[in-house]
Image (cartoon, helix red, strand yellow):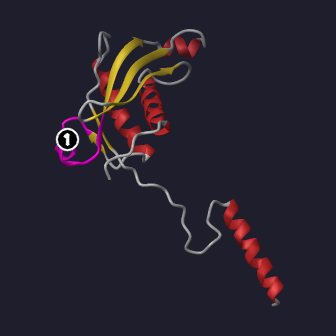
Amino acid sequence: MSTRTKLSSLMLIGAVLATQGASPLIGATKSVPAPQWSVQVAEVDPGDVNLEPAFRIAIYENLLEELTKTKHFKEVFRSGDRKAGGAADVLILKVTVKSYTPGSETKRAVTTVAGATKLKVLSQLTTRDGKDVLERTVDGNVRFIGSNLRATHNLAHNVAKGIKDAQLPAGSD
């Protein structure tokens, strides 16, 4: 095999690997910065809204799951987790329900106009000493197909996405 043929073959292999998301250089890796912060999720505050306990619990559990999925934090702690007390660079996520409109799965099945379940929360990310890092109003709803609790998943997903997309300050590491 000529040198020119070998070079062409290597270029072809590199092009194929690059289109598949792999690095064409053997041993080369993409550098992904390690998360600097951990987050502790406080219990959901229902505020002045008459929210069913199942919805509060579902919001909380979905927040834990969605924040973990983002891989944006070193660790995701539950409220009251003793390990969070000894961890460095922990942010506190507080969620306060601002509005809740219960929906009807039956109405959603019959019409696309009525029956939506809607949630709106104030999402606050603070340092342990109370400094605001991020504050946003976030919506979650289910309009067409899905159970009423699906709105809590959509809400948690939107909160986690907003945090992931935000520019967080550098930690002490």
Which residue, given by chain and number where applicable, does mark 1 sit on? 81
Q: Secondary structure at mark 1?
A: loop
Residue shown at 73% from the left, 77% from the top: 10
- Residue 91 location in percent, x, y? 30, 38
Residue 148 percent across, percent down from the top left: 43, 20
Residue 133 within the segment the image draws in magenta? no
Assess disc 1: are there few (<14), some (14-19) or many (≥20) residues with their C-alpha within 10 Å of its C-alpha.
few
Relative to 164, does residue 116 appear above or below in the rendering?
above
Q: Is residue 81 magenta?
A: yes
Q: Residue at x 55, y 16 (%)?
A: 109
- Which of the pair 60/128 is nearer the observer? 128
Front residue (pair 167, 141):
167
- Highlighted range, magenta: 78-92
Q: Along the horizontal axis of the image, is 153 left or right of 108?
A: left
Q: Is residue 161 left or right of residue 47?
A: right
- Image quadrant in which you'd find residue 103: top left
Q: Position of residue 141 (x, y in %)?
A: 49, 20
Above or below residue 91? Residue 44 is above
The correct choice, above or below, for 99 with respect to 68 in the image is above
Q: Quadrant of residue 1?
A: bottom right
Q: Amino acid at mark 1?
A: Asp
61 above or below 9?
Answer: above
- All told, the count of numbered labels is 1
Q: Residue at x 45, y 55 (%)?
A: 33
Quarter holding residue 84 = top left
Q: Position of residue 113 (x, y in %)?
A: 59, 9
Residue at the image point whose x is 42% and y is 12% from the top: 102
State the residue lying farthest toward the bottom.
1
